[in-house]
Amino acid sequence: MAYHPRENWDPARRRRLQSRREFLKQAAALGIALPGLGAILAACGDDSPGSAISLPIGTPDSPVTQPLSDANAAIASGLDAEAGPLRVYNWAEYINPDVIPLAEEAIGASIEVTTFFNLEESIQKLASGEVQFDVWFPTGNYISKAVAGELVQPLNHEYLPNLAANVWPALADPFYDGGSLYSVPYTVYQTGIGWRIDQVDDEDVLGLENPWDVFWNPKYKSITGLYDDFQETLTMAMFRNGVADPTNAGQNDIDAAADSLAELVDLMNIRYTIDGAYAGIPENRFGLHHAWSGDMIGSQYYYPEDQDPSVGRYAWPAKIDGSTAKGNIANDCMAVLKGAANPVLAHRFLDYLLDNDAALENFGWLGYQPPITSIDPDTLVADEWVLPDMGPAIVREDDFANPQGYVPTQLSPETEQAWNGAWSRAKGTA
C-alpha cells in the first residue's frame, strides 16, 4: 500500500505517527483528561484559593473580549525582527513541511518546529518554564483558559496585516476572543457523516429528516463507527435526540444521549475509532462513519492503489436538503506565547500563514481549510485540491451563519464533569 507524505507513516513500526486530531480521539478512548482551568493555573503556580481569575466564555450569541493587563502587554510597533531562530510549538503533523522553508524566507530567520501530542503536555511544559517557544497552536476553546493562565500575550495587529485583509470577517473577530486580541484562526472544519456508496445507500443519509438517524440503522450493523471524542459524539447523539443547544443541556438530555449511544452496542455493533473516517472508510473497514470534513478531504490519500476514491461521500447534516438536524462547525487557532524570545518573528510567522498563497499550499497537505477569503470554494474541486465527490466537505464562510450549524463552546467545569460521566457510561457498555 502506498502512503502519501501527509499520512505520517512510520515504516519501522508499520503504523502512522499520532496526529493532532488523532490524539483528541484517542484521549477520549483512554480516558485522558485534557487540562481545565485549575490545571493551567496550577501549572502557572497560581492555584491558591484567593486567586481571583476571570474566565470569559464566549458564544456566537454572546461574544466576549478577553481581558488585557499592564503586566501582559502587546509588543510595541515598529520593532526590528529578532535574529531567531523562531521556535514553534505545534501539534504533530499539523503544518505542511514544505511551507516551513518558504516561511523562513518570508520572515528572514530559521524556524525550529517542536511537536506535542496533547494540550496537557504542552500547557504543563510551557507554564513550568521547562520549554521556551514563541508560537503555539491551541484549540479555540482553550483561548480563554490560556489568557487566564497568562500563557499567551496580546497581539499587535500592526504586524498582522493579513488578518484583516485575508481572513473571514467572523473569524478575524471571533466570539471567543473579540478583536482577535490573543489569537488568529488557523483552520476550519465541520462534523458530519462519511460513507461509501458501495456499502451505504445515499438516501439512507440524504433522505432523512434527521440524518444522524443513520447511525441507528441496523441495515449497517458492523460497518459503522463513531469518533472517540466525548464532546463531538455526545453532541451528535443530542442532535439526533432533538436537543438544540448541547453546551447548555441539562442532566436529563446528557443522560439520554448516553442512553442512545449505549443502544448502538447491540443494535449496530458500534466501534469507536481514532482513524475510521480518513483511513477506515478508504481501507473498507467501515462503510459509514462520523466524520470531520478535513478528514474526508484528506481521505483520498488513504485508498489502496487498486481502490477508487470516488466511492467516498460526505455530508454535513446542517446543510442536507430537507434536514432539520444541526451539525458542529468550528476552528483552531495560533497564538504568540507570553515571554516569547522572538515576538516580532512570531507575529510575522502568523501573518505568513494567513497569506493567500501560503494558506492554500498548507491546505493542500492538511485537508483542513484555512479561513482565507481568497480561497474560492467553487474552484477547489476544479483546481483539484478536493476530489469532485468530496465537494460537500468544503467549508464555506456562510456555513458559520447557517442556523442549523452549531459552534461548540467551552464547557463549564461542572458541565464537563457531567459529560465525562455520561461518556464513560456509554463507552462502558461498548
Image (tube, rainbow, N blue to C red):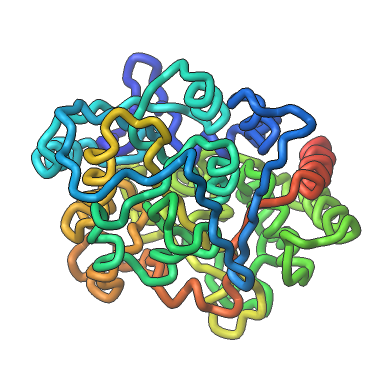
Of residue 77 and residue 253, the one placed in the foreground of this image is 77
Task: Using the image, determine if residue 248 lies above or below residue 352.
Answer: below
Q: Image point 51% across, 46% down: which residue?
A: 69
Image quadrant in which you'd find residue 113: top left
Q: Image point 69% across, 45% down: which residue?
A: 230
Of residue 241 and residue 262, the one placed in the foreground of this image is 241
The location of residue 394, given as percent across then percent down, is 38, 66
Of residue 427 and residue 374, the one placed in the foreground of this image is 374
- Looking at this view, name the residue that lies furthest to the right: 252
The location of residue 172, given as percent across then percent down, is 39, 64
- Looking at this view, name the residue that lies furthest to the bottom: 322
Q: Image point 38% across, 34% down: which residue?
A: 90
Image quadrant in which you'd find residue 48: top right
The location of residue 31, given as percent across then percent down, is 70, 30
Side (left or right) of 412 relative to 91: right
Image quadrant in which you'd find residue 387: bottom left
Task: Using the image, determine if residue 18 lies above or below residue 142.
Answer: above
Q: Is residue 112 visible?
A: yes
The N terminus: image quadrant: top left
Q: Image point 34% across, 22% down: which residue?
A: 10
Side (left or right) of 78 relative to 248: left
Side (left or right) of 126 relative to 233: left
Q: Is residue 303 visible?
A: no
